[in-house]
């Protein structure tokens, strides 16, 4: 299960690149919650989970050690090269977000790819990313607000990364686009066409 | 460019005995016992209806069926040497991996670990043999379909294949372009064994020694010299749809008079010079008529359609069109428009398509009634095309616009699509299709020809050189990383502002144009301002008090010192040289690095797909570009597109030796020179300067 075939490797890096592109469109989502975040900055944490999605999808679909981390790093490097306003901070964020999801799968020794594991991955990513942002960006924010932000991060990680990512991977399996990958093969054993 | 001799190694024989293959996801084998002997040097044409397993047979012959994907017997072993068997796919986009044509052709030799001077020689010889006559610095994904297929051919030739396997290499091209590619293939494969799978056999017939007709599950229905089969086994050829049925009359509605319907949409004097549309175009689309927009690839067909539907602005001229809810569009890739989990739901997914009985009738007419519960993405190519058209018609549009609705389909499936378009026309819908398919053009009431684009193979102007270009990408990365670390020394607003001085002074060395610099710096300054505000509001000091603002200013300066040097330095970093540096200088594993570079090179392509997907969905009335639902659906569609492509891409890359490329070489060196020593000095300066600045301003 640890050997990366070419298709595993490509799917992993392309998930990263595709999200790097989709993220450019996601900027629009921040305008939706704009009124909320202008009044209360920590509310921005509510959307944090979407940035961990490449890691979650690569992990759930490719199911190989390192896939989650690699996909998230490709997405991060891509946004850096495109001129992300967080510069090298983006690479550390990629490491934290990819690392959190990776850690969840590692804890199951890459044997379980279920909803609870996905939620755990989202939560771990949220914890790590929050820690990094606290150090790098919000040093001077009071602990009361930082704590609120952490709660938003964890909630977002669990729902937008964990639940949504898991649902998206199910939806992808249903399309047949991942039939040649680990996630698709598992489904193929149950439903044959 | 001087014509080079054919590149092939001694021709290879092909042998299979009792070859069976059953993918894990299928209940029936796709190849059910194939016995095939092809002597070296023979040219074989593989024909058969869509779904007869031609592609799988080619994969099998290439030795690229993965035992992890299914159950196989008598599988052909993987090639003994990288690139021994070249493989060309239907859509060349999947074969392209390089940021430049030159790098793309070098990909195979890199995988074969051929050292540098020989490697680049091979690449340029292969490009000449494949008749690629563009500047090798050109980006392959920005060239036309015909050029792309020849670049892909060069990619295969660079490894001297003894067997060339071609999977419908011309089915997406217009006739003249297809002829050019065919000529290039035949000339380049002079010495090799050649197996071509194609559903339009006529143009290949004069050039092949043998025709094999496959039936379901890749069973051989007929096998022999082409003239003999055409003569003796015509029935089989017609029955399988390889040859068109004779005496096939196009169904015509008897009392139709084209041209008397009202004008539903019109273009007047439209020019889009940025897309090669320099001559003003006038076009009227009438209700009850089928109008076909033709012209060679790159002429601007898609652009003109987008202007007509209001998705693009013309450079000059004007367009009249119905309300958005009365326009339905079908994109070239039908999967880009799918949103529902079943065929039935897909038909009424648009808020403008609510008539249940119409939906059911269309389902029936499109021949999809038996698939009502199936997942749209799991349909075959022809079924997907018909579903997208039926879903568009379910909106009862006044204007139906289609982009290449028959591309890549075999004769029978093209006929089915045409039948649907005829029925739309008979309902009084104005139908406009961009197409180079002669079947469609022949059936049209009106045709509008676009002139060939000016063939100046314009190479994008070389970007202005800046001092930062002299540095190795790793040095540029180091500057950003050390600057980020150094910024943590900022403790006061005075120190913070002073810490920014070197970045401001050195910025001109890394800035290509003032506009570009502003584009990169504006988000940083905006974020810094946001952080200042947040800190002043939510810090420990009383909200928005004087001291709170000073802490905010310190934070803004600190984050700018953290980010700005890196962002400016990264402006000079390109994916390919970065990959070269990671592979050669840091000696990171070659396969992940090369795959990541290939993914980053596709970003502009992915961006185009993303825009098409979002546009198609907006046009179906599924929401605006800010709707979370639309964004979620678009992301899923982009992932489906990307993942399907990944499978083809993996195949193309493995046929160029990527699977075994554990120790690969790199076509370009990653030089580290005297400039990098200076760069190192700058990096160290960025590391220590904020600390020194704090000492200079004294304890806060």
Image (cartoon, helix red, strand yellow):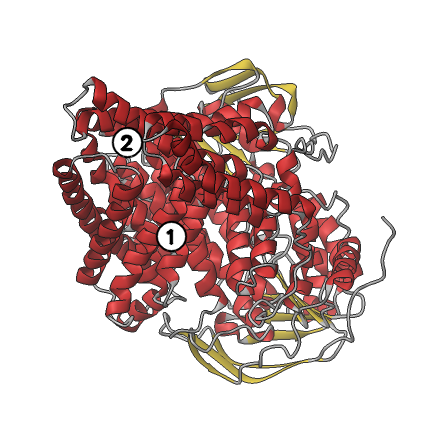
Task: Give the letter of the chain under mark 2.
Answer: A
Dot 1 corresponds to which residue?
A72
Name the side, left or right, on which B151 lies relative to B359.
Answer: right
The image shows residue B196 at horizontal and vertical percentages of 66, 64
In whole angstroms, how far apart are the C-alphas of marks 2 and 1? Answer: 21 Å
Q: Which mark is residue B369?
A: none
Camera-nearest residue between B126 and B676: B676
Which quadrant would residue B351 be assigned to in this image? Answer: top left
Q: Residue at x 45, y 47 (%)?
A: A77
In the rendered image, the quadrant that contains the C terminus of chain B is top left
Camera-nearest residue between B109 and B388: B109
How dense is the environment of label 2, judged by Cα within 10 Å: few (below 14), some, or many (20 and up)? Answer: some
**Image height check: is B217 above or below B646?**
below
* SS at badge 1: helix
Dot 2 corresponds to which residue?
A30
The image shows residue B297 at horizontal and vertical percentages of 64, 38
Which quadrant would residue B454 be assigned to in this image? Answer: top right
């Amino acid at each position: 299960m640890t050997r990366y075939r070419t298709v595993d490797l490509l799917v992993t890096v392309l998930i990263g690149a595709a999200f790097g592109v989709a993220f450019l469109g996601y900027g629009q989502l921040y305008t939706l919650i704009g009124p909320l975040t202008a009044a209360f900055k920590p509310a921005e944490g509510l959307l944090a989970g979407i940035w961990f999605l490449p890691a979650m999808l690569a992990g759930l679909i490719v199911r190989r050690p390192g896939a989650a981390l690699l996909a998230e790093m490709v997405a991060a490097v891509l946004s850096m090269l495109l001129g992300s306003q967080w510069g090298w901070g983006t690479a550390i964020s990629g490491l934290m977000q990819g690392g959190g999801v990776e850690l969840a799968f590692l804890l199951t020794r890459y044997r379980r790819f279920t909803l609870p594991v996905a939620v755990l991955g989202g939560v771990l990513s949220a914890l790590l990313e929050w820690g990094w942002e606290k150090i790098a960006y919000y040093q001077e924010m009071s602990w009361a607000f930082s704590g609120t932000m952490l709660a938003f991060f964890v909630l977002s990680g669990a729902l937008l990364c964990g639940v949504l990512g898991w649902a998206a991977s199910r939806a992808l399996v249903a399309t047949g686009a991942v039939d040649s990958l680990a996630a698709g093969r598992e489904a193929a054993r149950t439903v044959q066409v | 460019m001087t014509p080079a001799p054919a590149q092939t190694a001694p021709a290879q024989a092909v042998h299979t005995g009792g070859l069976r293959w059953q993918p894990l996801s299928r209940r029936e084998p796709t190849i059910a016992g194939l016995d095939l002997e092809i002597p070296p040097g023979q040219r074989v044409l593989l024909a058969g209806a869509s779904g007869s397993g031609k592609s799988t047979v080619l994969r099998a012959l290439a030795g690229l069926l993965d035992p992890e994907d299914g159950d196989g017997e008598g599988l052909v072993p993987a090639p003994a040497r990288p690139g021994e068997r070249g493989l060309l796919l239907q859509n060349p986009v999947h074969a392209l991996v390089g940021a430049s044509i030159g790098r793309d052709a070098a990909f195979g030799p890199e995988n074969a670990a051929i050292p540098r001077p020989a490697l680049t020689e091979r690449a340029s010889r292969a490009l000449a043999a494949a008749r690629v006559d563009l500047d090798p610095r050109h980006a392959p994904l920005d060239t036309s379909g015909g050029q792309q297929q020849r670049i892909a051919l060069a990619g295969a030739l660079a490894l001297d294949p003894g067997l060339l396997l071609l999977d419908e290499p011309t089915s997406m091209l217009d006739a003249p372009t297809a002829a050019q590619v065919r000529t290039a293939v035949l000339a380049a494969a002079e010495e090799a064994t050649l197996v071509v799978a194609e559903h339009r056999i006529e143009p290949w017939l004069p050039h092949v020694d043998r025709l094999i007709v496959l039936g379901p599950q890749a069973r051989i229905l007929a096998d022999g010299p082409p003239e003999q089969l055409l003569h003796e086994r015509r029935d089989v050829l017609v029955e399988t749809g390889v040859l068109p049925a004779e005496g096939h009359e196009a169904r015509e509605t008897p009392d139709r008079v084209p041209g008397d319907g009202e004008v539903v949409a019109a273009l007047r004097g439209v020019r889009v010079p940025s897309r090669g549309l320099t001559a003003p175009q006038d076009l009227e689309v009438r209700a009850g008529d089928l109008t076909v927009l033709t012209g060679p690839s790159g002429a601007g067909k898609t652009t003109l359609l987008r202007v007509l539907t209001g998705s693009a602005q013309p450079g000059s001229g004007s367009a009249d069109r119905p309300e958005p809810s009365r326009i339905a569009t079908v994109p070239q890739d039908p999967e880009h428009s799918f949103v529902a989990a079943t065929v039935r739901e897909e038909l009424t997914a648009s808020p403008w398509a609510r008539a249940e009985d119409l939906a059911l009738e269309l389902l029936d007419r499109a021949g999809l009634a038996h698939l009502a519960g199936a997942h749209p993405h799991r349909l075959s190519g022809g079924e997907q095309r018909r579903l997208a058209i039926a879903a568009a018609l379910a909106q009862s549009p006044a204007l139906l616009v289609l982009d290449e609705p028959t591309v890549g389909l075999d004769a029978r499936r093209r006929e089915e699509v045409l039948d649907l378009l005829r029925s739309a026309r008979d309902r009084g819908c104005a139908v406009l299709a961009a197409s180079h398919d002669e079947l469609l053009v022949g059936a049209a009431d009106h045709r509008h020809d676009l002139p060939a684009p000016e063939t100046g193979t314009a190479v994008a102007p070389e970007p202005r050189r800046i001092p930062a270009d002299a540095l190795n990408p790793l040095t540029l990365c180091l500057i950003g990383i050390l600057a980020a670390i150094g910024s943590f020394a900022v403790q006061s607003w005075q120190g913070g502002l002073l810490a920014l001085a070197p970045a401001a002074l050195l910025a001109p060395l890394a800035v290509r144009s003032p506009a570009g610099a502003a584009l990169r710096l504006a988000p940083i300054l905006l974020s810094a301002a946001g952080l200042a505000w947040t800190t002043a509001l939510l810090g420990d000091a009383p909200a928005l008090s004087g001291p709170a603002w000073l802490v905010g200013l310190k934070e803004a300066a600190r984050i700018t010192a953290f980010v700005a040097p890196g962002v400016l330095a990264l402006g000079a970093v390109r994916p390919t040289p970065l990959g070269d540096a990671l592979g050669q200088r840091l000696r990171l594993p070659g396969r992940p690095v090369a795959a990541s570079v290939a993914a980053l090179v596709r970003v502009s392509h992915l961006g185009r797909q993303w825009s098409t997907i979002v546009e198609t969905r907006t046009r179906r009335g599924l929401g605006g570009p800010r709707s979370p639902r639309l964004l979620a659906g678009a992301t899923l569609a982009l992932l489906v597109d990307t993942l399907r492509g990944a499978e083809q891409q993996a195949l193309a890359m493995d046929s160029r030796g990527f699977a075994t490329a554990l120790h690969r070489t790199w076509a370009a060196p990653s030089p580290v020179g005297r400039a990098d020593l200076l760069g190192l000095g700058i990096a160290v300066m960025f590391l220590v300067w904020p600390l020194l600045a704090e000492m200079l301003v004294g304890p806060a």
